[in-house]
Amino acid sequence: MAKQPPTTTGASILIHHQVVPDAMAHYEGWLADIIQAAAEFPGHQGVTIVKPAKGQHHYEIAVRFSSEADARRWLESQVRQQLIAEVAPLLQLPENVRVSTGIDQWFQPLDSDAPHPVRWKQWLVTTLVICLLTMLVPPVLQLLFKLAPALGIWGLRHLLSAAVIVGLVVYLIMPRLVPLLAGWLFKR
């Protein structure tokens, strides 16, 4: 994996494992162990696992950290290296790992050979999320603007609304929504 300068924004470690068919149950036990180990590292924010469809053996895992430096610290840790050495015999291929930051990861398949979702699906999901937030966030912020009228002036209130909406989309909603919709998004 090529070293790049760390960023100060959140980061996800995107991992693709192709498991030996007869080793699925053993792999699942190992997966629980490594998830627990990652959770003990600074900056850990959660894990999303896309399990294989029936008859398939490909796992896609996204481990979220608060910074790229935290993500790389976990990736390079002795704990992780030992756990990866344990699981190596259960994998058909060496693991595929990359660190992703910002919005570039929303619609990026973890498997580099996998097809990307068609643009209209990306547009539809993003539009629906932003549409919903533009209906919900401004009325909620209106309460803040009543308490602090200086924040409600034209331009500033729009900037604050946009910042809250983009923050929710980038850090909260899309990283959780896209894995839930992966079956539909990546289906051609």
Image (cartoon, helix red, strand yellow):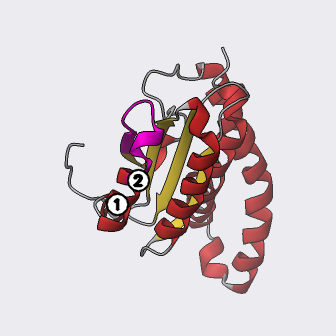
Residue neighbourhood size for the residue with mark 1, other residues' Cα within 10 Å, grouped as few (<14), some (14–19), many (≥20): few
Residue 166 colored magenta? no
Quadrant of the snapshot with the N terminus: top left
Residue 171 appearing in the image? yes
* Residue on which disc 1 sits: 82
Foreground pick, 186 / 154: 186
Identity of the amino acid at label 1?
A: Gln
Position of residue 185 in the picture relative to residue 69 (left or right): right
The residue drawn where x is 52% and y is 49% is 62
Occupied quadrant, residue 160 = bottom right
The verdict on residue 94 being magenta is: yes
Residue stretch rendered in magenta on the structure:
86-98
Q: Is residue 120 left or right of residue 128?
A: left
Determine the residue positioned at 72% across, 85% down.
147
Residue nearest the observer in this picture, 124 or 36: 36
In the rendered image, the quadrant that contains the C terminus is: top right
Residue 166 appears in the figure: no
The answer to whether 93 is drawn above or below residue 174 in the figure is: above
Look at 54% across and 63% down and name the residue there.
33
Q: Residues within 10 Å of mark 2 (few under 14, many from 20)?
A: few
Give the answer, above or below, for where 116 lies relative to 82.
above
Looking at the image, residue 8 lies above or below residue 85: below
Q: Position of residue 76 (x, y in %)?
A: 28, 60
